[in-house]
Amino acid sequence: MSFDALPPEVIFDVLEHLYQEQNPPIIGQKAAWTRMLPKPEESTEPDERSNGNTFYTNSEHSAGYLALLALRRTSRYLNDLCIPLIFRDYHLFTSHWHPVEGKLSILRTYAKHIRNIRLVANTPTIYTREYEYIISTVLPLCTNATSLSLYYDQNLDILPMKESLALLKCGTIQSFGIYSMVILNQEIGNPTWEDKKPALAYELLNKLAQDTGLVSNLRILDIVMETLPTKTYELIQTRALSLQSYTIRRAFRSTILDRIWVRHNRWMPNDNLTCLRLIDCSNAYAPHIPYLVQHFNSLRELMVSTCGDNDDVDPKTSRKNGWSKELGALCNVHRPLDTFHIENMIEWEIYELGVIPAVEVIVTFVNGEHLKRCLVRDAEIFPGVKVLHLGEVHGATKDDHGGDNWYGLPLICQQMGIEIRRGAKRVRRRYYME
């Protein structure tokens, strides 16, 4: 029996599986914590630090991609099915891509199939002019693209702002991300990054937010930047009201911006927002996060990773028994989140976040004793929680049967009626905090 004779739904599943083997960083999913690195020339074991989140900028095509190319040649029917997948993703790197007229011809022919565009301005080379030429030639033809990712390194002068805005104005782009490769490729943040002012990136975001037509088309926005000026921050707070997913890594700095929730709050209501991820945002003061959750009443997924500032003060909050039954409790005015991911947070911060209701709570890279004390201190913590996903928990020891007792967390959770599942994956690593 030929491949063509299979039911269409089976063929589609096979082709989609082959496409997914390429594992590209997707805006709104893992792009904000996927490193962009050249693949080592010598064959090495997988880098454990990457947690599986590394996209190699100079790797050969994946086996899935090569299989799609082979299937395409077997019949016209499969060719028509494979072409949209083969050309769905378009990556352009200044550091190693040298376009020739033959490749340009192919891109011109199949530009209508391109859906996800990633432009990586990492290193100026002898190919920089070719990079700029291919952008100006091909991007205007990608009128069906729905996703645009811009990556920059130290050299912001080659960030394709004009072409990016033109593509955004086509009206088909629903997912947009701008990423600093310096941040993506480092395990731990560096205070000196706050001295870096990516002016072109600021200008691009400002123009995007100021244009009501452009920003209203967006459903997913990722910002991974060293800093964000107050003007840009306030524009996003007040203008990006159609977003369904919003991921911020590092850009919200307490040295430049007010805390994430201030008395005269600038966040406009957004009933569309279902996913919010805050990663390494020093202005994200833990006691203010519940106010954000209450403000965004459609929120279903929340991530708080490595947030807060070293100068943050523990408010010494104490909740009495039965607090979750009070009418004003967050769990009684907001539906429980589907998932709430806490990472790299210390004891008092975890306790403050504990008023947020969630069905599944994911905890990675925390001190196990801190988590235990929070659970013991407040039996109503994370109202509605049914499953606790545990990743790396510092200080886990062995029980009498040789298994991890995780500071006795399994027993505590059993008494609270919470199921424990292990193996949760972290977003980023950080030095151990006491």
Image: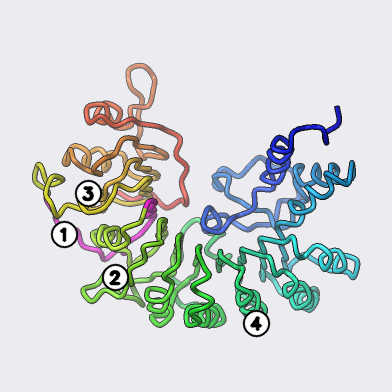
Number of labels in the image equals 4
Question: Which of label 1 and label 2 is nearer to you?
Answer: 2
Residue assigned mark 2? 259
Mark 4–mark 1 distance (CA, rounded to whole Å): 47 Å
Residue assigned mark 3? 331
Most common SS among magenta residues: loop
Mark 1–mark 2 distance (CA, rounded to whole Å): 15 Å
- In terms of secondary structure, where does tag 2 sit? loop
> Is residue 252 within the magenta segment?
no
Question: Which of label 4 and label 1 is nearer to you?
Answer: 4
- In terms of secondary structure, where does tag 1 sit? loop
Question: Which of label 2 and label 4 is nearer to you?
Answer: 4
On screen, residue 10 above or below 383: above
Residue at image position (52%, 64%) is 183
Label 1: few (<14), some or many (≥20) within 10 Å?
A: few
The magenta-colored residue range is: 300-318
| Residue 125 appearing in the image | no
Mark 2–mark 4 distance (CA, rounded to whole Å): 33 Å
Q: Amino acid at mark 1?
A: Pro
Quadrant location of the N terminus?
top right
Residue assigned mark 1? 315
Question: Residue 215, how many percent across, how many down?
Answer: 50, 74
Which residue is nearer to you in this view: 256 or 217?
Answer: 217
Residue assigned mark 4? 162
